[in-house]
Amino acid sequence: MDAAEFRKRGKEMVDYVADYLEKIEKRQVFPDVEPGYLRPLIADCAPQDPESFEDVFKDIEKIIMPGVTHWHSPYFFAYFPAASSFPALLADMLCGGIGCVGFSWAASPACTELETVMLDWLGKMVNLPEEFLAGKDGQGGGVIQGSASEATLIALLAARTKTIRQVQSEKPELTEAEIMGRLVAYASDQAHSSVERAALIGAVKIKSVPSDEAFSVCGSALKKVLDEDKAAGLIPFFFCATLGTTSCCSFDKLLELGPICNKENIWMHIDAAYAGSAFICPEFRHLLNGVEFADSFNFNPHKWLLVNFDCSAMWDTLAFEPQSSHTTPSWPQVKKRSDLIGAFKLEPLYLQHHHQESGLVTDYRHWQIPLGRRFRSLKLWFVLRMYGVKGLQEHIRKHIRLSHQFEHLVLQDERFEICAEVVLGLVCFRLKGSNELNEALLKSLNDAKKIHLVPCHLREKFVLRFAICSRTVESTHIKFAWQHISQLATDLLKTWGQNHHQQ
Amino acid sequence: MDAAEFRKRGKEMVDYVADYLEKIEKRQVFPDVEPGYLRPLIADCAPQDPESFEDVFKDIEKIIMPGVTHWHSPYFFAYFPAASSFPALLADMLCGGIGCVGFSWAASPACTELETVMLDWLGKMVNLPEEFLAGKDGQGGGVIQGSASEATLIALLAARTKTIRQVQSEKPELTEAEIMGRLVAYASDQAHSSVERAALIGAVKIKSVPSDEAFSVCGSALKKVLDEDKAAGLIPFFFCATLGTTSCCSFDKLLELGPICNKENIWMHIDAAYAGSAFICPEFRHLLNGVEFADSFNFNPHKWLLVNFDCSAMWDTLAFEPQSSHTTPSWPQVKKRSDLIGAFKLEPLYLQHHHQESGLVTDYRHWQIPLGRRFRSLKLWFVLRMYGVKGLQEHIRKHIRLSHQFEHLVLQDERFEICAEVVLGLVCFRLKGSNELNEALLKSLNDAKKIHLVPCHLREKFVLRFAICSRTVESTHIKFAWQHISQLATDLLKTWGQNHHQQ
């Protein structure tokens, strides 16, 4: 395919994507296919000779679309939102066209520099303390990770390195393995599974801190486990606070937890993957109070800020720490080095460039797990400018309004209960009654495939999660969803009364 | 921006990208900007009110392009290629439009199933042994990672978990921390820095195995370190073999190394990030002989197979291992579990779906570091079909032909030497003489900015790497590059003779 054909086909693809998103409401939100549906529809191996674009294009509707879960359908209420907007799609086209791999400043200076400035824009939008921002002197600042899981892992690894170095300087008789065996990380019993996973990868112990009746971790709960573990000779080193848990969007009490972590020399990372976007609205910013105690903070514009996946924003207050220079006198006397990047900085010659020791540039490869990176800040640049802060605030506020609309509908029906406070765009609800009853309700909902949602456990309860997801979801869709749920509940309860008389 | 405006702007963007790539040759390959160039060109914070597409669009040439290193210029010979093709760009547009997040089968069945089939296609193209493929029964098979760094890390973590379990079952008196303290990973002294980084992240020791005069690791070199380390009470558990090292594209001797790893119960991972794409040509497939001894294998179609970044293909022979069932009898008696995914499989309810224990589906989230994942297999599907195997072979062969053309030009000039065998698309060369002389040559090349390349160290020598990168590079560009290098060398040697008379 040459540039001339790309012009033609690219425009057809633009129309296809526009059609898809304009008419997505007419597609069944969850597919009918069974596991293994696709393989029989496709050749056993790649063709030897080129096929035409037309042949591939017509297979999109024939082979791909029947197996797609439509995340941007206004009837999709599962998981958390995956952001999507037209400006972000345009930026991704540009990103693909430029096709640079920005692992160092020199590999494409614009790729690094736009990212630094965009993370400052975003940091200011959620009113992060000054020390999280890069500012004009090029120190500190944020980075785009692929996902919150990676951000948590990076923070945990940085904390691990920092603690091992500290302990070794105080007790040189301990080996690294001995120290590792005593390190403990902590997170809420409501924290995302990726926190436990980060600890497994980092080969450190992790303990759940019990959350309170509102599913929040408070200071006394953390203090209790810390005291026990320190008495047992363990070394607490990392606490991952969650703002907006995945199960029910609860908030750990930063203002209590932060001072404890600071006093005990524990790295506090804040995972606000979903909720973070809401902090651009002044009326929700108070939920982030206490961030000033944190060492690192992360949220996902690719969830709720209309920037297509992947774009997970992470900031680190300790990003640059002075360390004495040991090399060429022509460099500045104080070299800036980060706790975060210090954890695994390696410098083979083929990745070096003559600006890297100037203290003036950022080489983002030291801040992340992969080496390569796409020009993802273009998406932020397009979205922040073409929506403006006000446009994005409107989007957040609409979603929160709709979640309260749904909450209100649930509360008006005596058969149902709300299971956790509705703070942002997630409603946890269930039929009053057994877990089996609620499992049956979810099954009938997902069998009907008119709307799509997923469950969670809150303590011993099986709960339905209704997350406002689509950019285009409106009040009418919420009403439809509720009428549908309500009708299926009525149908279910009729049968349930007969079949489960004893329950 | 609504769908109607997206149709208009999307088409403008298609033309912009087509223009950019068609005329890329006219742009200076490496930018003139200094660190910090971008911030003064951009507002301090995001606008409150929306800006127009026109305003953003005109800033692309004004703000972004002056700071872009043009990876797809035919004058770009740095690093390794970053793949780019029109079919891949089209597929990425579709991927963005669908915008699903495929962390589990249910999150979008097509996203998982196409990936499994595409990795089979690709595996067959490089003639991988049967046990690496998923096949019709849905066991084993490949996965798309973001980068080779992630693939190496995943393999190392899986090997770590497997070894710890084995050692614990044999010596239950050892704690996990004690075992961890004795684990050792190995890689060539020529291996990519990401291997050392994976060991740092995984908190295990890593040792360099000395390569021979051809920069390859041979069996006896590995055997020697293994014997020493075992005698010292250490536990060798992981060897990362490299096919196509970053510095000089050398190849570790799999046929010698594989049997040693198998005998010693060491996980052998093969990193063929760059070279792997060449194995689709029968005449280069012999370089992969010995893969049958490996536990996992990885290469990057996003380097050399015309699939835009990111798309790193990884296969695992042990992907599915029988393990006895301990639960519901309605499930198959033998549950398939992977060494790889077993390393960090966690199952919160909100990620579960009713097919996941059937043994019929793959939940790729267990195979990787991030939770979320884009629909990247679309890129493979578009590229493999629209180029066909023959078209891709042509692309590989053209690059290798051009590298030999360059090698030939170097060899004809007595002032220069070739520093490593030219096997694929990379030529390592230098002026006969001091490292300082070659550093000066590189500096004059990169100051002139007519072509762009990066250096490497081979043992004590400073060497220039000339990598064939662009999809559109032709013989004339190679000739131009050589004439330019040759001229700068002439200029340099004139002055050098006067200023460095004693050297």
Image (cartoon, coloured by chain):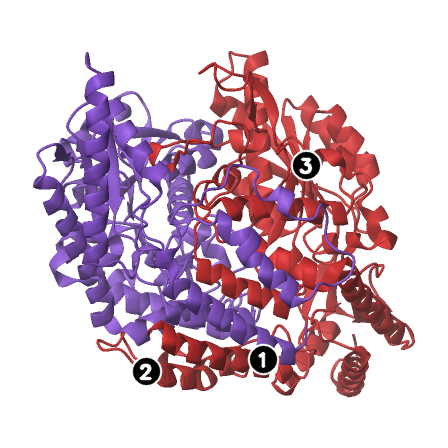
Chain colours: A purple, B red
Q: Is residue B321 left or right of residue A149?
A: right
Residue that mark 2 sits on = B52
Q: Amino acid at mark 1?
A: Ala
Chain letter belonging to callout 1: B
| Of marks 1 and 3, the one in the foreground | 3
> Which mark sits nearer the N-terminus, 1 or 3?
1
Q: Amino acid at mark 3?
A: Gly
| Residue A139 sits in quarter | bottom left
Question: Which residue lies under the disc numbered 3?
Answer: B135
* B142 versus B381 height, above or below: above
Q: Is residue A54 above or below residue A244?
A: below
Vertical placement of residue B420 versus A75, above or below: below
Position of residue B488 relative to residue B309, above or below, is below
- The residue to which callout 1 is attached is B18
* Residue toward you, A371 or B490: A371
- Residue closest to the eye, B451 or B182: B451
Q: Residues within 10 Å of mark 1 (few under 14, many from 20)?
A: many
Q: Is residue A197 left or right of residue A56?
A: left
State the SS at label 3.
Answer: loop
Which chain contains the residue that carries disc 3? B
Sequence-first tag of 3 and 2:
2
> Residue A304's x, y, as percent?
30, 57
- Residue A256 seen by the camera: yes
- For residue B444, which quarter of the picture? bottom right
- What residue is drawn where x is 29% and y is 65%? A122
Tell me the element at label 2. Answer: loop
The image shows a total of numbered marks equal to 3
Residue at 63%, 25% in the rendered image: B235
